[in-house]
Image (cartoon, rainbow, N blue to C red):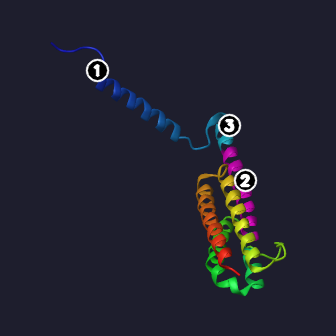
Amino acid sequence: MRRTGTTRRGALTATGALAMGAVLAGCGGDGGTEGGGGTAHTGAQAAAVRADRALRAAAVRTGAGLLARYEAVGKAHPTTAAGLAPLRAATEEHLKALAAGAGKKQSLSFVRTPPVADARTAVKELAAAERRAADAHTTALMTAGPELARLLASIAAASAAHAYLLTELAKETS
């Protein structure tokens, strides 16, 4: 006796075909559809690009401030230069990666740094600045686009690691 009606296999096949059709219909838009739908989509993209640029500019300012602090501590306390050199270099690379979207080379001349205290205190303050930078990058990545969010997450993780290493360096600094 042959079974009649809808089988499980037939239902799954039909559901899959409908889902695939819906996905393909959604992906087929070229932004120039009638009724202004493309304009709204383009407007949303432009707003997202502007938001990412603003987030990137803020991250560049944070990175430039951090790099200026490394410079100030290194100049004021040459004994810490060897311990700060790799962290400073990494911070400079982060700044370059962030500034790549801006199209300008960053100048540190606009950054004001607080006066540098004794070596131990200066390194502790640098660790605190790295923690603040990690927090700022983490907060910013929540609203960033996917590409910028990945970059900010990576830089935030590096800043957190730098903060730890600087805290340990401060313990060893006399």
| SS for dot 3 | helix
Q: Amino acid at mark 2?
A: Arg
- Residue 81 visible to the viewer: yes
Residue 10 found in image quarter:
top left
Task: Estimate the x, y position of residue 109 in percent, counting from the top left.
Answer: 82, 77
Looking at the image, do the residues carrying marks 3 and 1 touch, with CB atoms under 8 Å apart? no
Q: Where is the N terminus found, in terms of image quarters?
A: top left
Name which residue lies at 71% across and 65% down. 102
Residue density around tag 1, few if under 14, some if 14–19, many if 20 or more, within 10 Å: few
Name which residue lies at 62% across and 67% down. 164
Vertical comparison of 143 with 162: above or below: above
Vertical comparison of 3 with 47: above or below: above
Task: Estimate the x, y position of residue 88 in percent, counting from the top left.
Answer: 66, 76
Say whether residue 112 is magenta: no
- Label 1, label 2: how many angstroms apart (C-alpha)? 52 Å
Q: Which disc, if any, is residue 7? A: 1
* 138 or 49, nearer to the observer: 138
Q: Main secondary structure of the magenta part?
A: helix
Q: Amino acid at mark 3?
A: Gly
Q: Where is the C terminus found, in terms of image quarters?
A: bottom right
* 94 or 18, nearer to the observer: 94
- Label 3, label 1: how many angstroms apart (C-alpha)? 43 Å
First to last magenta residue range:
42-65
Residue under circle 3? 36
Disc number lying in front (3 or 1): 1
| SS for dot 2 | helix
| SS for dot 1 | loop
Say whether residue 44 is magenta: yes
Q: Which mark sits nearer the N-terminus, 3 or 2?
A: 3
Task: Estimate the x, y position of residue 111 in percent, counting from the top left.
Answer: 81, 72
